[in-house]
Amino acid sequence: MKCLKTASILILAVFSLSMVSGVFAADRCILPVKEEKKLTVNVNEKFNITLESNPSTGYKWISEFDSNSLKLVNETYIPDMPIRCGSGGYQIFTFKALKTGKTDLTMKYIMPWENCLPAKEIIYHINIVN
């Protein structure tokens, strides 16, 4: 009888812990790290934004910007050397300033398939001059 009672308590404890761990696993979103930076560029000038990245984690940088003020010319990934499984690298975004004025460029480090806040967010306040 004592063995049955102990087994029942053990099963109940395992079941309870599995329910709690499921709650924590469902809430995998993290609070974002936000930064703000200022840039001044000339109209028609190309400039690069280079950010550390590790696609093996599922994260990648995406850009949000006003297409009337900026144009994304190129986006590339350069791995760290030597290339190793799981190692990081850099995502390089090349933009062209299209017209004078002020605009914001927001870079978000996200897992594209998740509905979470970005792990990192950098807002570039850009002043485009002649």
Image (cartoon, grey):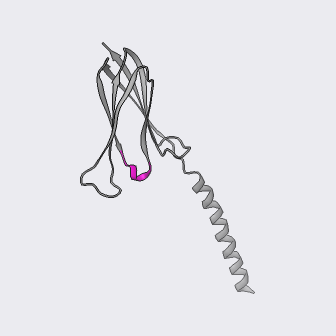
Q: Quadrant of the C terminus?
A: top left
**102 to 120, vertically: above or below:** above
Write the residue at 69% across / 71% down. 12
In reply to whether residue 2 is colored magenta, the answer given is no
Q: Quadrant of the N terminus?
A: bottom right
Image-quadrant location for residue 78: top left
Identify the magenta region.
53-58
Q: Residue furthest left?
A: 82
**Relative image position of residue 20 (x, y in whole percent):** 63, 60
**2 to 81, vertically: above or below:** below
Write the residue at 41% across / 20% down. 69
Image-quadrant location for residue 66: top left
Q: Is residue 20 left or right of residue 91?
A: right
**66 to 23, vertically: above or below:** above
**Relative image position of residue 47 (x, y in whole percent):** 30, 27
**Relative image position of residue 44 (x, y in whole percent):** 31, 19
In reply to whether residue 57 is colored magenta, the answer given is yes
**Relative image position of residue 18 (x, y in whole percent):** 63, 65
Write the residue at 27% across / 54% down. 83
Image-quadrant location for residue 37: top left
| Residue toward you, 63 or 6 | 63
